[in-house]
Amino acid sequence: MSRIDGRKYDQLRQVRITRNYIKHAEGSVLIEVGDTKIICTASVEEKLPRFMLDPTQKRRGGWVTAEYSMLPRATKTRNIRDATRGKIGGRTQEIQRLIGRSLRAIVDGKLLGERTIWLDCDVVQADGGTRTAAITGAFIALWDACSHLIDRKKIKEMPIIDFIAATSVGIIKGQPMLDLCYVEDSIADVDMNIVMTAQGGFVELQGTAEQSPFSREEANGLIDLAIGGIEQLISLQRKMLIGGEELVEL
């Protein structure tokens, strides 16, 4: 079946990443995946969260955490800000925990030292895949924040131990597809978000059947499809971070 934007079933949307997008942050990017646009910033705070100061805590070293939000007109109709509601919505909590969990998986806290890096992911425009794009973009902002600490001799070596990226996959009318836009996601029979490191380790597999249950074979096919997309995204990250580029596109 043809896709609404003419892509092949195994093709990512156009990806564009702009580095150093925010002047004051230690690390920042604007990541654009199709019509989804997210500003990701990394801010260094020279203290740990209160729970890590508990002497019974086994975790030692630094902490990486995330906050996620969507601007009111990131979608077709206006969303009420969480600040106006007076509480953070369940979806927002789920996504920011996913982002934080994913980025902590590739950071050696001992090398980071006793400090916190905040990853703020703000959706300017949403067209599906905001959580996966946020993870892919936040990784670059995190890398630049850690490089900032190295340059200022606050840490001795890079605490990031691997690259990480994420994408979505799904099944629509029996056809597995990579990187779903909003319209595709809204009609998918199966929807899955996958977070993976460059070494092939999975941090998160979020899969849901919207209609009938899916088989083990279908799940394996979706994972294989996602791996191909994530490898392309990590290649783009490497081009930016290892190659020193300020703007990369796929």
Image (cartoon, rainbow, N blue to C red):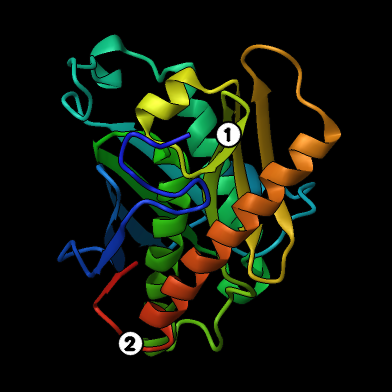
Amino acid marked by disc 1: Gly
Q: Residue at x 55, y 60 (%)?
A: 230
Q: Secondary structure at mark 1?
A: strand
Q: What's the CA distance linking mark 1 and mark 2?
A: 34 Å
* Label 2, residues with CA under 10 Å away: few <14, some 14-19, many ≥20: few
Q: Which residue is found at the position 40% from the left and 20% from the top? A: 88
First in sequence: mark 1 vs mark 2: 1
Closer to the eye: label 1 or 2: 1
Which residue is found at the position 57% from the left and 66% from the top? 231
Q: Is residue 49 above or below residue 71?
A: below
State whether residue 17 is above or below residue 79: below
**In terms of depth relative to the viewer, which is nearer, 155 or 122?**
122
Q: Are marks 1 and 2 in contact (CB under 8 Å)?
A: no
**Rendered location of residue 117, percent (x, y):** 45, 59
Q: How many marks?
A: 2
Where is the C terminus found, in terms of image quarters? bottom left
Is residue 49 in view?
Answer: no
Foreground residue, 88 or 8? 8
Residue 244 badge:
2
**Image quarter of residue 42:** bottom left
Disc 2 is placed on an element classified as loop
Circle 1 residue: 170
- Residue 92 sits in quarter: top left
Residue 183 appears in which quarter of the rendering? top left
Q: Position of residue 198 (x, y in %)?
A: 64, 70
Q: Residues within 10 Å of mark 1 (few under 14, many from 20)?
A: many
Q: Residue at x 50, y 63 (%)?
A: 115
Seen from the viewer's position, the closer of residues 32 and 144 is 32
At label 2, the amino acid type is Gly
Residue lying furthest right: 216
Q: Give above or below for 9 relative to 28.
A: above
